[in-house]
């Protein structure tokens, strides 16, 4: 006898009764007139009505007598549709109930199945689900952020011959496991190059641990680098902690600002580089390491060695393959593309459609950028966020010097052609100001090919102000002639 035949021979009513009686949710069934024909103990408990009294009672009558505030079963019968809602019993307990009508072949309601659960418990479950959704969204945001950071590292701007040469060089370096030392001024993108090397290597799927040697307090450097066993020192985590080298095993560790590392730690770093082994503070076990080391500094390490400020043996261990990142001022071909890349990035981030006017882009390309790529990125972000119009003009930047304070400093006032005004040899201050204002407005109108709307945008005033000032100038000129 097969399984289906055995099931058909079973007493379906007893089977259904066992299921209903052991359910945690409240379940009861009414006929088409609202009479309860079946109910489980949970329904009796939730409605605070004895089970033998509940079966045979009418849901409509129970609402009328105040046994509970409403009946979704009765509403399902009236509306001939699924009904859900909160039901409060005479004892003060509130349930979330849902009732589903079942129809026969003639369209009459054969029965209504109602189930309910405690409202407070229901809300706790919903709250937990919402919390989990929030956590999942947070994880998604972090993953998206990390994915974008990896994209950013892979989308290096290399329009200039200098950067093209460096990219070709690091692509050859990436396939090896050699130690790399990256030199360059602050803000040139040393970490981006380090990440690029890691992403192009066979370690790309492993950890990339970035450590800023200048940012960690000297007292914590050793424990951060090498980790510690439980109870290694006062205040140590009771479970111990892995160090940066341990965490980067099979991957890449990037030691930024390595010139700032104290001499005492330099000797320990040297040993790790020589033996490729690390031991936690307070531990006895040596851990074998399979790591790639990339260092970076904005200082001349060879000069520091000569001054006895950096260990010579460590210098030679690190300086296996040196990579020099040129400052931005020596590769102007990259400035335009970098500015456009950052502009696109922040337009997407803040849902804008900002763009640089041609003369603004020209002055960005002509600037020396002592803060290098980092300074350029900051100026672009500030411009996108604070500009009031889609076109970012020189006039707007001049009037908002805090956005790019160094570009428009006293030593670099901006495009000189804007200041070629003919100042009258005589006259009171009001007339001189009016004449200079008139000349400047006309110069901007000329640059904008007579478009008053665009000129007003560049001047940071309403177009009606332009008309008014030009009109006042003509009227004053007539008075002088008469």
Image (spheres, helix red, strand yellow):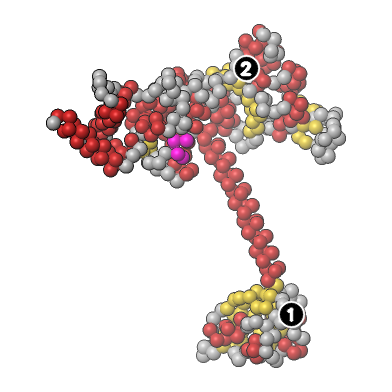
Asked if one can make out residue 92 in the rendered structure from this viewpoint, the answer is: yes
Characterize the magenta stretch by its predominant secondary structure. helix
Q: Position of residue 407 (x, y in %)?
A: 43, 25
Residue at image x 50%, y 24%?
Answer: 372
In this view, the residue in front, 22 or 145, is 145
Left or right side of 326 for 290: right
**Magenta span covers which residues?**
382-386
- First of labels 1, 2 by sequence position: 1
On the image, numbered disc 1 is attached to which residue? 91
Total marks placed: 2
Residue under the point 71% across and 82% down: 90
Q: Is-magenta flag for residue 245?
A: no
Q: Which of the labelled discs sits on residue 320, or is there none?
A: 2
Residue 406, numbered circle: none
x then y, percent, for residue 41 = 76, 81
Q: Secondary structure at mark 1?
A: loop
Rate crowding at label 1 as few (under 14), some (14 to 19) or many (20 or more) other CA atoms within 10 Å: few
- Contact between marks 1 and 2 (CB within 8 A): the answer is no
Q: Choose mark 1 or mark 2, whichever is in front.
A: 1
Residue 318: give x, y in percent of width and height. Answer: 65, 18
Name above or below for residue 367 compared with residue 133.
above
């Amino acid at each position: 006898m097969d399984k289906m035949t055995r099931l058909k021979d079973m007493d379906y009513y007893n089977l259904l009764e066992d299921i209903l009686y052991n359910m945690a949710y409240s379940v009861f069934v009414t006929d088409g007139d609202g009479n309860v024909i079946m109910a489980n103990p949970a329904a009796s408990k939730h409605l605070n009505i004895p089970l033998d009294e509940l079966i045979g009672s009418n849901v409509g009558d129970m609402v009328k007598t105040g046994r509970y505030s409403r009946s979704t079963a009765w509403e399902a019968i009236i509306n001939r549709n699924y009904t859900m809602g909160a039901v409060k019993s005479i004892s003060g307990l509130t349930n979330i109930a849902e009732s589903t009508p079942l129809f026969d072949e003639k369209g009459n309601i054969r029965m209504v199945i109602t189930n309910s659960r405690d409202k407070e418990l229901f809300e706790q479950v919903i709250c937990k689900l919402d919390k989990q959704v929030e956590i999942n969204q947070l994880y998604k945001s972090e993953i998206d952020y990390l994915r974008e950071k990896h994209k950013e590292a892979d989308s290096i701007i290399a329009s200039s011959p200098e950067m093209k040469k460096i990219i070709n060089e690091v692509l050859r370096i990436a396939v090896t496991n050699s130690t790399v030392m990256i030199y360059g001024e602050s803000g040139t993108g040393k970490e981006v190059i380090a990440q690029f090397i890691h992403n192009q290597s066979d370690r790309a799927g492993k950890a990339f641990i970035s450590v800023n040697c200048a940012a960690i307090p000297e007292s914590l450097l050793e424990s951060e680098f090498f980790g510690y066993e439980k109870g290694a020192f006062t205040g140590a985590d009771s479970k111990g902690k892995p160090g940066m080298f341990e965490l980067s095993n099979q991957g890449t560790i990037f030691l930024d600002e390595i010139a700032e590392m104290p001499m005492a730690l330099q000797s320990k770093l040297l040993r790790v580089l020589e033996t490729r082994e690390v031991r936690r503070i307070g531990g006895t076990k040596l851990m074998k390491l399979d790591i790639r080391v990339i260092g970076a500094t904005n200082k001349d390490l060879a000069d520091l060695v000569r001054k006895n400020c950096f260990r010579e043996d460590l210098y030679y261990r690190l300086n296996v393959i040196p990579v020099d990142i040129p400052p931005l001022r020596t590769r102007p071909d990259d400035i335009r593309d970098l500015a456009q890349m950052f502009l696109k990035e922040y337009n997407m981030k803040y849902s804008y459609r900002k763009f640089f006017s041609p003369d603004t882009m020209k002055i960005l390309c002509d600037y020396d950028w002592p803060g290098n790529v980092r300074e350029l990125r900051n100026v672009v972000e500030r411009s996108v966020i604070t500009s009031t119009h889609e076109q970012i003009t020189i006039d707007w930047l001049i009037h908002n010097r805090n956005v790019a304070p160094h570009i428009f400093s006293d030593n670099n006032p901006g495009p000189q052609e804007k200041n070629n005004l003919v100042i009258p040899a005589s006259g009171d201050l009001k007339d001189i100001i009016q004449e200079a204002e008139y000349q400047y407005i006309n110069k901007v109108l000329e640059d904008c090919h007579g478009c008053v709307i665009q000129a007003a945008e560049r001047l940071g005033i309403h177009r009606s102000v332009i008309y008014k000032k030009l009109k006042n100038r003509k009227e004053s000129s007539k008075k002088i002639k008469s």
